[in-house]
Image: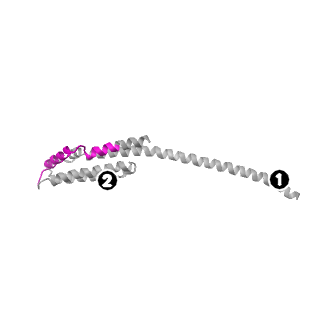
Amino acid sequence: MNELIEILKYCIPSAIVFGVTYYLMKTFFEREKNLKSEENKILARKDYVPNRIQAYERAVLYLERIDPNNLIARVHRPGMTAKMLHGELLKSIREEYNHNMVQQIYISQNGWKQLKQAKEESAKIFNMAMQSMPEGASAMELSTSIFEIVSKLEKLPTEIALDKIRVDFQKGMMS
């Protein structure tokens, strides 16, 4: 019996020390894990915000580049036919869009929807103008027809999308 008491004299304090040490170490590691998690979140935000800003910048640039006034000036070359200009305009819109497609992960769903709609509406303008062209029309005639359609619009699709994307960006940066 005395031997059992002697063993318990050493075991009980050891068990208490072990329990306290285990509790302190567990608490310490949980706290470290939480701090590391917070640090990772801060680092992720630190990288995310510049990428998001860049995505909105690229969206604005895309919309400016597909604006009929800018696009025609950039794509038109002397000696082009209406058919050639029409093809180049649509190709340019499509290539620009494909080049910027990855940006949609940083732009709100509504913002990307507006950008996509501007792309489709701009293509419709070009298609409508082309449908009214006689066979063998020049690029200048197509340009004139596009500008006539554009002049009848209250606001260009690209301007509407730009306005909505700016508002979307400002809301996103404030939150």
Q: Are marks 2 and 1 in contact (CB under 8 Å)?
A: no
What residue is rendered at 72% in x and 52% in y?
A: 19
Provide residue 148's location: percent of width, then percent of height: 17, 45
Residue type pointed to by label 1: Lys
Q: Answer with left or right where residue 8 lies relative to residue 133.
A: right
For residue 25, the mark is none
Task: Examine the structure image and report whether residue 24 is included in the region drawn in magenta.
Answer: no
Task: Examine the structure image and report whether residue 151 is included in the region drawn in magenta.
Answer: yes
Q: Answer with left or right where residue 84 lies relative to residue 115.
A: left
Q: Which residue is mark 1?
A: 9
- The chief SS type of the magenta part is helix
Provide residue 107's location: percent of width, then percent of height: 38, 48
- Mark 2 residue crowding within 10 angstroms, few (<14) / some (14–19) / many (20+): few
Residue type pointed to by label 2: Asn
Q: Answer with left or right where residue 61 lies relative to residue 39.
A: left
Mark 2 or mark 1: which comes first in sequence?
1
For residue 98, the mark is 2
User: Which residue is situated farthest in the right direction here?
Assistant: 2
- Mark 1 residue crowding within 10 angstroms, few (<14) / some (14–19) / many (20+): few
Number of marks present in the image shown: 2
What residue is rendered at 56% in x and 47% in y?
A: 36
Provide residue 118's location: percent of width, then percent of height: 28, 49
Check the picture and name the quadrant holding the C terminus: top left
Provide residue 3's location: percent of width, then percent of height: 86, 58
Q: Answer with left or right where residue 24 lies relative to residue 14.
A: left
What residue is rendered at 53% in x and 45% in y?
A: 39
Instruction: Compute the Cα span from label 2 to label 1.
Output: 76 Å
Q: Nearer the viewer, residue 9 or 147?
A: 147
Check the picture and name the quadrant holding the N terminus: bottom right
- Circle 1 — which element? helix
- Circle 2 — which element? helix
Q: What segment carries the magenta color?
A: 136-165
